[in-house]
Amino acid sequence: MLAISIIGYLLLNLAIGLWASRRVSTTQDFILAGRSLPLMLAASATFATWFGSETIMGAPTEFVEHGVLGVIEDPFGAALCLLLVGLFFARRFYKMNIITFCDFFRIRYGRRAELLSAVMIIPSYFSWIAAQLLAMGIVLKVVLGWSLTECILLSSAVVILYTIWGGMWSISITDFLQTVMIIIGLTIVAVIMYQKTDGLGAITQKLPDGFFRFYPDFTFKASVEYFAAWITIGLGSIPQQDVFQRVMAAKSADTSVRATLISSGMYLTVALIPLFIALCGHVLYPELEMQDTQMIIPNMVLLHTGLPLQIMFFGALVSAILSTTSSAIMAPAAVLGENIVKFFNPDLTDKQLLLIIRISIVFITAICIYMATTRESIFELVAESSAFSLVSLFVPLAAGLYWRQSNTLGCLLSMVLGLVVWLLCVQLETEYPPMIYGLLASLAGMGAGILFGKKKVEESVPVR
């Protein structure tokens, strides 16, 4: 019965995608839902940006093992990202009336910056998408009893079809339904788990001292690592196409800002529910921690709850992963079509561009399927992509919006130096987080470009 219910839910997503396809006639309809989403759809779509495998299967494990300090990156850093987008970026982006994040680089810095930003942003999604597909495969394997590869292929087919059919329209509608499923399903599970314990006192007394400590030790290294945890998603996910698409899909600039701020609060509160469930499971069923740590909560629900609750929980889990995967796939596909293919062939018609983006969705998903079927750790895949945009794209984005002196040279140096230094530090396994070195290098690149640009201008001024 559980398997039938989950398959039925997957078919429902396909039906929604097919229905939403009737509203897609242009590239803007496909990528940004025609910039016409009302507040509730826009807020639920933005909330669903990262509420996937990491939130339900990754963060709870980290929370049980390391306490609050283990989940600063997600959900706290993720909620911070949405808050900052709403306060400082959403309105400015919306008024520019552009289709992709990389269009900003073309307008602000020129064609070279557009192409380089596109080349950098597309690979950053591969590991993230593969992580979601792997998580979906693991969940379906438990529910359906199929092989992991078969389950990954099934989930990939569902996501590809409803994303290709309806684009951002189908993503937004399914995100709204999936958000409702997530909140209801997780809340019911949390209440039942709490009732099985003897209250909060019984839970907290079995935890080590300092489990709920929000600040690290007052040492320089601990402070740097704490800062790095906050900014990995908190700043690094601001210059990402999936966040940008959801911000730009709202029906007005005010709606965009309000939706982003609401989604920040929603994410912070709802994402705490899986942490609480894991904590209850840690107290009630410690033996489950000896198995696959990525499946602590799913296994707990499967082994110790009835069928109705299992259907509700796994429906919520599938919902969360699907919503994250669909937008993550469409984001690089949109950039590939709009900012790379169109860069070399500017005479493409809108109809041709839309076809290219849809083909790109299939191509990108195929790459990620291969990555998902050859790897075993969701968290290893997520870690590979988490800092990519932080070290290469955040500084030129923020400088382009808020630093008038920023220029093309500074942008190019910032992107290249930040990425190269970060990759070098990853290989060297530096004592401090590599993203800190990459971010500092990116800042230095922007500063050097501005300084050199000033000198060049001064030298070119004729002497009278």
Image (cartoon, grey):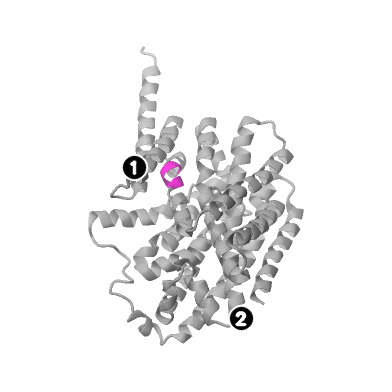
**Image position, residue 110 (x, y; %):** 52, 31
Determine crowd level at label 1: few under 14, some 14-19, many 20+ residues with C-alpha closer than 10 A.
some
- Quadrant the N terminus occupies: bottom right
Q: Is 429 in front, or is 67?
A: 429
Is residue 390 shown in magenta? Answer: yes
Residue 368 horizontal/vertical position (percent): 57, 50
Q: Is residue 435 above or below residue 59?
A: above
Question: Marks 2 and 1: which is nearer the front?
Answer: 2
Residue drawn at x 58%, y 83% is 306
Residue 155 x %, y %: 63, 60
Res 10 quadrant in image: bottom right
* Residue 7 relative to residue 202: left or right: right
Q: Residue at x 48, y 81 (%)?
A: 193
Q: CA distance from mark 2 to mark 1?
A: 52 Å
Residue located at (38% from left, 62% from top): 72
Q: Is residue 297 left or right of residue 16?
A: left
In what element is the residue under mark 2? helix
Residue 440 image label: 1
Which region shows up in magenta? Answer: 388-393
Residue shown at the point (33%, 80%) measured from the top left:
206
Can you identify the residue that label 2 sits on? 307
Residue 98 is covered by the magenta coloring: no
User: In screen coordinates, is 316 left or right of 88?
Assistant: right
Q: Earlier in the sequence, mark 2 or mark 1?
A: 2
Q: Where, by quadrant of the figure, is residue 412 drawn?
A: top left
Amino acid type of the residue tagged 2 in the rendering: Leu
Note whether residue 363 is visible.
Answer: yes
